[in-house]
Image (tube, rainbow, N blue to C red):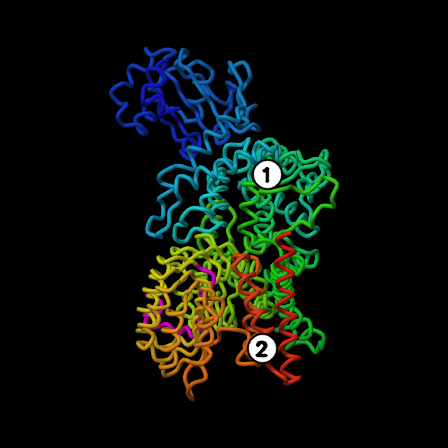
Amino acid sequence: MVLDWCYGRLPAFELLIPFSCEDLSSLGPAPASLCHLVAQRYTPLKEILPLMAAAGSRLLFVLHGLEHLNLNFQLAGTGLCSDPEEPKAPAAIMVNLLRKYMLPKASILVTTRPSAIGRIPSKYVGRYGEICGFSDTNLQKLYFQIRLNQPDCVHGAGDAGVSTTPAQRDNLVQMLSRNLEGHHQIAAACFLPSYCWLVCATLHFLHAPTPAGQTLTSIYTSFLRLNFSGEMLESTDSSKLSLMAYAARTMGKLAYEGVSSRKTYFSEEDVRGCLEAGIKTEEEFQLVHVFRRDALRFFLAPCIEPGHPDTFVFTVPAMQEYLAALYIVLGLHKTTLQRVGKEVAELVGRVGEDVSLVLGIMAKLLPLRALPLLFNLLKVVPRVFGRVVGKSREAVARAMVLEMFREEDYYNDDVLDQMGASILGVEGPRRHPDEPPEDEVFELFPIFMGGLLSAHNRAVLAQLGCPIKNLDAMENAQAIKKKLGKLGRQVLPPSELLDHLFFHYEFQNQRFSAEVLSSLRQLNLAGVRMTPLKCTVVASVLGSGRHALDEVNLASCQLDPAGLRTFMPVFLRARKLGLQLNSLGPEACRDLRDLLLHDKCQITTLRLSNNPLTAAGVAFLVEGLAGNTSLTHLSLLHTGLGDEGLELLAARLNCNRQLQELNVAYNGAGDAAALALAKAAREHPSLELLHLYFNELSPEGRQVLRDLGGTAEGGARVVVSLTEGTAVSEYWSVILSEVQRNLKSWDQGRVRRHLELLLRDLDDNQGATLNPLRKAQLLRVKGEVRALLEQLGGSES
């Protein structure tokens, strides 16, 4: 509104003067005139102060945040004052403005929390208006379109080498709009504009380049700071309790009880029980009333999902897990033993030294044997309480780690995909209402616990009135590390392993992560959709480690060249690297060449099968092979090399001196290119095995390659079929397992044709041999081939 007036879009007002009531309250009772207050805050207005009285109704005062001021409209408390030049307490000036005694014709707009409305007598108010949220869903959609396409958000991390395209941003807006139109709970959340901000901030985090140091926890903490800053729950209350601290104590308790009992729906009795727990005084009842009026509906919303009438849910699901984590890390969850033990320990600590001194003197003067025993007990009490607190921290750490490694959650999506689905919806058929509900998942809860212990979030929480002491954070981190060290050694499914790494990313403590992850030897993320954010998470957590990774498996992860560049620090620690089924093209081969030529590269096995590398990509790879000294096994199975790709390999293969196995099967190469590569392989000093099966070889070409493999001692073995002579090849199971693994992704017509050729070859060899053992082996392999052909027939039908 102020900006609109500055740009001339509020012609009804000649002069607009905004005041922050929070700033005015900080001045205390020190007298100052209205003119002085205006000139002090808006120096350029000094010259037109005399015109205020003449402006009449064209003068607008905006008093923002009235709840910060304690106003007294009784004449005995606040005297009358009509002169803008007369010094008075800031609260007295505001009272006289609202009384219309000072500048009676001026217009006044007041913003306040609902609980403070009664501080202004109704006779001084011309109109009340409550801003609840977006009344027009078209305005809501317009907000999302503008916010998700803001240049500062789109290019906020341009140095990351990744940026979202206009088509991707439009797709996000469309998916979000469809989910909102489905009348889901998120539509109720986005009725509040501040939650629209949170939705957009989360989408940017998930899909746009991530600024350095930004975490999901920091987004939620910043969201609460934007909404509540450090404001008090009730300015007239002597406790000066911050609104966020009160929310952590009450809503955090409700959230944690929901996580513990695995529920997200709460009755009015549940809510009342958490708000009114332990209330003993009238002042405490007043705080509950204020919180209910001002903030309760910010955290809780009526459930609109079918089957849950008269219940409440947290406005967005992740907020429940955030508040539950905050409740724990603030130390608000205490058993009865802890509460009583703390009070006793504090009491003993206050009087312990004096009593101990007196008992020590009495023990020397009087022959009382019980006094030394009492003396020692006084020393033991604080120590025992310290152990109780330590056990509590261990219990919290254990609960957090068990939640992180729940076997029931092993085969669901990772938490980042779950968050995206909760905002954008799930593509495809939805669960039928009559089906039994799935168990609630709270995998963000332990992750938020780690994030809240990071230094940045603790600093922001302190501004919100929720400080976490450094010593408490350190002891909690040590307890968590101890438990993670024990349970974190187990082999996790890919999605759960990513969740574990995301926990470390949120914690933002490289030393902690390096110690906990020192036993990690295999990074298996196969099948996890690796977005730019997930690549950043893994690289930032594992990129700075020192120990080698025996294997990094990123098969079928939808990686792109930008993702490969992000992963480079992790690749330099890997001995085996699997990048199959990622649609990587020639551009990615340029990055792989740089990886192979890096002086710290220690990769011995590189699997690139089922990627459209083509001959253009192999041109980069052979450059990397020429300068690499670690690679021994390279798989280029089904990478679209063709004759040109195999000829490039044949021409440059002698530049590499340590390769032991090369797989170029199923690449559409003909006889001449395959023979040239086979000859180069036979001359290679270290190559032991060359795979050429499923290429476009003629019967004569296959026979020449078989003969080449048996012409001389030494040299590489060339595998072109399931047979060698009249016997079964020792590599027949390798060939058929590759076919079985890729049966659904390969061209089924080509695979059928090659399998039929192999079957014919087996028939010919079965008729040519009289050895019964060989005949039995050939029959067994024929059965395996026929089973694969039957699978192809079934998939076609």
- Secondary structure, mark 2, is helix
Q: Position of residue 181 (x, y in %)?
A: 57, 31
Q: In terms of secondary structure, where does tag 1 sit? A: loop
- For marks 1 and 2, give the one nearer the viewer: 2
The amino acid pointed to by label 1 is Thr
Specify the segment rendered in magenta. 594-611
Return the disc, 1 or 2, that comes first in the chain's sequence.
1
Question: Percent position (x, y) of residue 596?
Answer: 35, 69
The answer to if 610 sits in the magenta stretch is yes
Which residue lies most toward the left here? 47
| Residue under the image location 60 percent in, 82 percent down | 769
Q: Which mark is residue 701?
A: none
Q: Are marks 1 and 2 in contact (CB under 8 Å)?
A: no
Can you tell which quarter of the image residue 619 is in? bottom left
Image height check: is 733 above or below 54? below
Count of marks, rendered view: 2
Spot occupied by residue 45 in the image (x, y as percentages of width and height): 28, 23
Instruction: Give the side of residue 3 with respect to residue 309, left or right.
Output: left
Is residue 542 highlighted in magenta? no
Position of residue 442 relative to residue 46, above or below, is below
Near mark 1 (Cα within 10 A), the count class, few <14, some 14-19 or many ≥20, is many
The residue tagged 1 is: 315
For the residue pair 408 and 241, the one nearer the viewer reads as 408
Q: Quadrant of the N terminus?
A: top left
Residue furthest to the bottom in view is: 713
The residue pinned by badge 2 equals 765
Q: Amino acid at mark 2?
A: Asn
The answer to whether residue 27 of the structure is visible from this angle is yes
Task: Give the class, few, some or many, for how many residues have Cα within 10 Å of label 2's Cα (few <14, many ≥20).
Answer: many
